[in-house]
């Protein structure tokens, strides 16, 4: 089967009717940023279905404006931690944390594919996206850059960026539990038991304060500035302004959020590392590691010559795509989830930034290398950036989506010309 057809088939197979699973087995619910990518993918062949995906995601927005990271539509014993562990009391049940706010950026991509057809759908979605961004600004940007209260919020769950924050979390009292992720994929490609104990300890803290954000931010076990989310949010604010203007809305408030977030960028620039860097907001310490979140700076037009040099260094050290961690660091592990592998979905986000900042040669290289991985092995969750070994889950929604919207584009053109 040709890869375009296969990608569409994956989206259809993972479609649960209005929302899409990231993949069967490993992730049996609706995940926040996965869902926004699914919408982008659906938009290439079924625009109404793309807008439906945003609608089901935002239907579970909390009264506070937060959009949760998982929506537990139907019970599934194959996933841990499930709704009983999160105990958020939402209906349908959800987790108590959020995920990277890519929705406005990808909703803009979808809207631009057919502005006339999308206008009414966008008008319905827009105030919900504004409410989510307002939550980010008032709850999570109070220190300047965007803060996360759990590594899972970053979407880059176990990347080395979070090690200093994780070291301060006590996972010793979480009690017994059975992980399910390691039953679906090779455990050596997943986070460790010590990491999982700490993840669960953070969830238990949230439950103990009734998911009160002010208490989690003030006293929770983990609070770090995330360069990845900071750049994603900054870009998303700017995309939301474009969408708001198109709807005739007053976007002054959003422009203020974007200005103050941009003004906070020097706080996450580590002069010793010569790169953007995660920072522990409890004590100001920099993580001192170069992760893929730093390169999302291009998405928010926040690149600079030092960062360009770092990008060239880490990219040239591997064969395929931009690695999630620095290949020249002792922490680099090319098959371990976010500690080294290349992620097609992150490559696609970086590509938007590279293209928009005029680096079309780099964008083309990234597209070619990402396409090679998918052509060789299929639509996996992530890949070893040195020898291309496929890792994590297979038939992955967001890998299929970015094939249709971006990575497969060259091939489409080649076919068209043939
Ligand atoms: C998982 O279960 O691994 C997810 O990344 C948490 O959202």
Image (cartoon, rainbow, N blue to C red):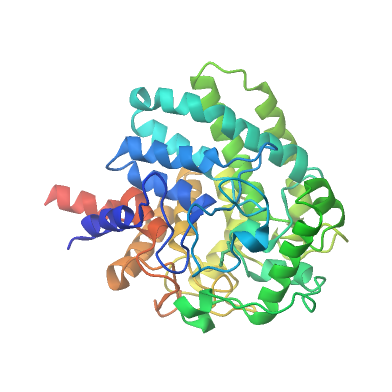
**Residue 8 drawn at (x, y percent):** 27, 53
**Residue 125 drawn at (x, y percent):** 51, 30
- Residue lying furthest left: 418
| Left or right for 349, reference 210 | left
Which residue is located at x 41 percent, y 49 percent? Answer: 38
**Residue 2 drawn at (x, y percent):** 18, 60
417 relative to 83, above or below: above
Quadrant location, ligand no. 1: bottom right
Closer-to-camera residue (257/265): 257
Which residue is located at x 70 percent, y 69 percent? Answer: 200
Numbered circles on residues, count: 0
**Residue 231 drawn at (x, y percent):** 62, 47
Question: Could you tell me if residue 270 is visible in this image?
Answer: no
- Residue lying furthest top: 248
Closer-to-camera residue (396/225): 396
Q: Quadrant of the N terminus?
A: bottom left
Closer-to-camera residue (39/315): 39
Which residue is located at x 79 percent, y 48 percent? Answer: 212
Question: Could you tell me if residue 258 is visible in this image?
Answer: yes
Which residue is located at x 84 percent, y 50 percent? Answer: 215
């Amino acid at each position: 089967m040709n890869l375009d057809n296969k990608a569409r088939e994956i989206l259809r197979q993972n479609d649960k009717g209005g929302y899409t699973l990231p993949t069967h087995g490993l992730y049996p619910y609706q995940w926040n940023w996965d869902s926004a990518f699914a919408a982008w993918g659906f938009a290439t062949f079924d625009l109404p279905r793309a807008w439906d995906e945003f609608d089901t995601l935002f239907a579970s927005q909390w009264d506070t404006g937060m959009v949760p990271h998982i929506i537990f539509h139907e019970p599934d014993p194959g996933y841990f931690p499930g709704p009983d562990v999160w105990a958020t009391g939402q209906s349908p049940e959800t987790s108590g944390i959020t995920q990277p706010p890519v929705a406005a950026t990808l909703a803009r991509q979808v809207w631009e594919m057919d502005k006339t057809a999308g206008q009414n759908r966008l008008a319905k979605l827009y105030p919900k996206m504004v409410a989510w961004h307002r939550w980010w600004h008032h709850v999570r940007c109070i220190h300047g850059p965007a803060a996360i209260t759990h590594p899972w919020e970053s979407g880059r769950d176990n990347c080395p960026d979070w090690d200093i924050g994780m070291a301060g979390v006590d996972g010793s009292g979480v009690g017994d539990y059975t992980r399910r992720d390691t039953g679906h994929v090779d455990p050596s490609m997943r986070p460790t038991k010590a990491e999982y104990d700490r993840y669960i300890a953070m969830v238990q803290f949230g439950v103990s304060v009734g998911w009160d954000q002010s208490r989690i931010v003030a006293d929770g076990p983990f609070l770090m500035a995330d360069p990845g989310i900071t750049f994603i949010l900054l870009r998303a604010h700017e995309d939301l302004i474009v969408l708001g203007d198109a709807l005739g809305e007053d976007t002054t408030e959003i422009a203020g959020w974007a200005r103050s977030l941009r003004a906070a960028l020097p706080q996450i620039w580590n002069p010793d590392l010569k790169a953007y860097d995660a920072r522990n907001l409890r004590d100001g310490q920099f993580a001192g590691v170069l992760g893929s979140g730093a390169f999302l700076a291009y998405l928010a037009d926040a690149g600079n010559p030092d960062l360009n040099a770092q990008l060239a260094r880490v990219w040239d050290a591997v064969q395929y795509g931009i690695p999630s961690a620095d290949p020249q660091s002792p922490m680099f592990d090319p098959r371990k989830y976010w500690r080294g592998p290349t992620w097609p979905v992150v490559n696609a986000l970086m590509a938007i930034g590279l293209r928009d900042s005029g680096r079309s040669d780099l964008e083309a290289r990234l597209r070619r290398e990402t396409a090679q991985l998918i052509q060789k092995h299929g639509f996996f969750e992530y890949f070893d950036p040195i020898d291309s070994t496929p890792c994590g889950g297979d038939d992955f929604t967001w890998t299929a989506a970015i094939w249709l919207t971006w990575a497969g584009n060259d091939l489409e053109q080649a076919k068209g010309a043939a």
